[in-house]
Amino acid sequence: MVDWTIIAWAFLAGTGSLLAALLILRLTGAPGSGLGGEGAARKAARPSVEPLILLFRDRRLVDATGPARALLDALPGEGDWARLWTWLGQRFEAPQRILEMAAADGTAVLAGTPPAGAVASGRSAALRLRAEDLGGGLLRLELVDPTLEQGGITVNAHALAAMEDELGVLRESVDHAPVLIWREDAEGTVTWANAAYLREIEALNPDDVVWPLPRLIDLPGDADSVRRARIELDDQSRWFDCHVQAADGHRTIFAVPADDAVRAEGSLREFVRTLTKTFADLHIGLAIFDRERRLQLFNPALIDLTGLPGGFLTARPTLHAVLDALRERRMVPEPKDYASWRRTIATLEAGAASGHHVETWSLPGGQTYRVTGRPHPDGAIALLIDDISAEIAMTRRFRAELSLSAEVMDAMGSAVAIFDADGRLLSTNRRFEALWAAEGTPTLRGYDERWRLTAGDSPGYHALRAALTAARPEGSRSGAMAGPARELLSWQVCPLSAGRRMVMFAPTVPAGATLASSADSVAGAAGVLGEASEAAMAFAVPAAAIPEAAGAQPDPGATPSREPQQGWPVRSGAALALTEGGERVAGGVG
C-alpha cells in the first residue's frame, strides 16, 4: 500500500527547495546586471548593431555589409567609390590621406571632424574610419560610430517609410534642378553640392573628384544678395545669377544659368548704342519721357534746337519742367496768360499719349518748329522737335512765285492753257477761262469736244487737234479757227518739257481800234479786209457756216460791222488800214 504521507512530504520539500533557489537568485541579481529584472529584459530586447564594412578591389566594390549597402544606396551620384568618398569628405578632413597611410603601414585610423551645426551632438566627432590594405588591390574600410555601439534604436516602420519617401523626393528634386546648388561653411569650404554642381566639377576634372570640392564660383564672404558671376568651361563663358541664403555658420548658394539673359542684355546694349548713334546724327530733336513723364532719353539736336543746358536734361526733368524751361527761353509760342499755357501743355500731353499729335510753333525769334508727339508702350511718349523754318520760307517763296506766275499769265493778252502729257489741265489764265468756260472735268478731251462744236469740221480745228495730240511735236504750230462768238481766233501750240503743251488763243483784231473816217481809208480797208476775211474764214470756218457760201445775200443797205472784241491784241490775220488815236497805221499778216 502506497504511503501518501511520504509522497506529500517529498513534493512539499521539492517545491520549497525550488522556491528557495529562485529567491536566492532574485536577491543576488544586481540591478542592470543583465542577470534578472528589467535589466535582463532590456538586454534581451536590445538588438545588436551590424558593423559598417566595405571591401573594394581597385576602387570597385566587391562586398559590403547590410548597413554599408544601405548607406551607398542612400547617397546621391554615380559610382560606389565616388559616392562614398563624397560622403566621407563631408565628415572627415582630407579623408583621401588614409589611403596613403594604409598603403604605408597596412592599417590606418582617421578621426572625424564635425560639420557646421553638428558640434553640439558630438556624433560626427566620434566617427572613426579604419582602413586596412589587404594586398592585391584589396582595401577594407570600416566606419565606426562609438555613440551607436551597444545602442540599437527602434523606429516606427510607418514613420521611417514616410521619412524615406520624403527624403527621396527632396533628393530627386534637388538633383534634377537645372541650377547649381552647394553649401559652404564659415571658411568657404564646400560641404554639400547637388548633382548639377558635381557634373560641372567632373567636367573640369573628369579623372578625380575629391573632397572638399573646389569652388566653381568665388563669391565674397559678405555677399547676401544676387550676384552675377562667370566661369570658363571648355573655352566658353558661362554666366550665372547667384542667390545667397545665409544661415548660422554656413550659407547656401543657388546659381541660376543666365546665359540667355546676358546675351539679351548684350543685344539690348548694342541696339541702344546703335540707336544712340542714329539719334546723335538726327537733325530732329528727340525727347522720350517715361510713364511718370520724366525725361529718359534725348539727343544732341534737342540741345541745339532748344538751347537747354545738358546738365538740366541729364537730371531727368519732368515734361512740365522741360516746357516751362522752354517758355522761359522764349522757345515756345508766347501764350496770353499762364492758365492758357497750362492748357496748351495738357493738350500736348494728352494728344501725344492718345495718338499722333502735331503742332506748329511760330517762335518770337522768327523760327518755326514742328512738334510731334507719339505714344510709346507702357505709357511713355516721345516728342520730336523739327526746325521747319527753311521749309516754311521755301514754301512761302514757292507760293509767291506761283502767285507771280498767275499774275503774269493773267496779264497776258492771250488766253493760255497748259496740259500735261496725259491731257490733264495744269494751269490756265483768266482769259482762257472766260473764253472757253468748260463744264465737268477740265481735260484736253473735254476742251477738244468744245472746240469741235465751236469750229465745226474746219481745217483750223483739225490742225489744232493734230498739234495738241502729236506724239513728238516739232516746234510751235499756229493757225486760226472760229471762236465761241463766231469771231476769228488765232491759236498757237508750244511744246514744253515732260510732254506738256501750252495753247494760246487770240483774236485777230486789236482792242480799241477804230475804222478810218476817210472814204479812201474805208474803201481801201474794206477791200483788203474783204480779201483777207474770205481767205481766213475759209480756213477757220466750214463753208456751210458762211452766209454767202450758203446762198444768203447780204443786205446792200447794211454797213458791215468791224468792231473788234475789247482787250485782244493782234496775233495774225489780214492787213488792216486802221487808225489808233487818230493816226493811220498799217497792219501786216502775222
Image (tube, rainbow, N blue to C red):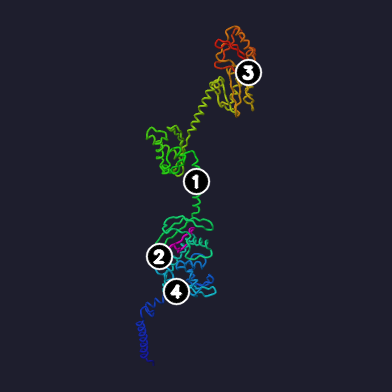
Judging by the rendered image, the residue that carries numbered circle 2 is 117
* Alpha carbon distance from label 1 to label 3: 75 Å
Is residue 208 toward the left or the right of residue 525 in the image? left
* Alpha carbon distance from label 1 to label 4: 71 Å
| Label 1–label 2 contact, CB within 8 A | no
* Residue 352 % position (x, y): 44, 39
| Label 3–label 4 contact, CB within 8 A | no
* Magenta-span inclusion, residue 181: yes
Which of 100 and 161 lies nearest the eye of the viewer? 100
Q: What is the secondary structure assignment of the residue under circle 3?
A: helix
Number of other residues with Cα within 10 Å of mark 1, as a class: few under 14, some 14 to 19, many 20 or more: few
Q: Nearer the viewer, mark 1 or mark 3?
A: 1
Is residue 354 toward the left or the right of residue 476 in the image? left
* Residue 91 % position (x, y): 44, 68
Q: Earlier in the sequence, mark 1 or mark 2?
A: 2
Judging by the rendered image, the residue that carries numbered circle 3 is 540
Q: What is the secondary structure assignment of the residue under circle 1?
A: helix
* Alpha carbon distance from label 1 to label 2: 51 Å
* Residue 366 % position (x, y): 44, 32
Q: What is the secondary structure assignment of the residue under circle 2?
A: loop
Q: Earlier in the sequence, mark 1 or mark 4?
A: 4
The total number of labels drawn is 4
Q: Earlier in the sequence, mark 2 or mark 4?
A: 4
Which of 190 and 187 lies nearest the eye of the viewer? 187
Instruction: Specify the segment rendered in magenta.
Output: 177-193
Q: Nearer the viewer, mark 3 or mark 4?
A: 3
* Residue 464 % position (x, y): 62, 22
Q: Earlier in the sequence, mark 1 or mark 3?
A: 1
Q: What is the secondary structure assignment of the residue under circle 4?
A: loop
Judging by the rendered image, the residue that carries numbered circle 4 is 49
Residue type at mark 3: give it. Ala
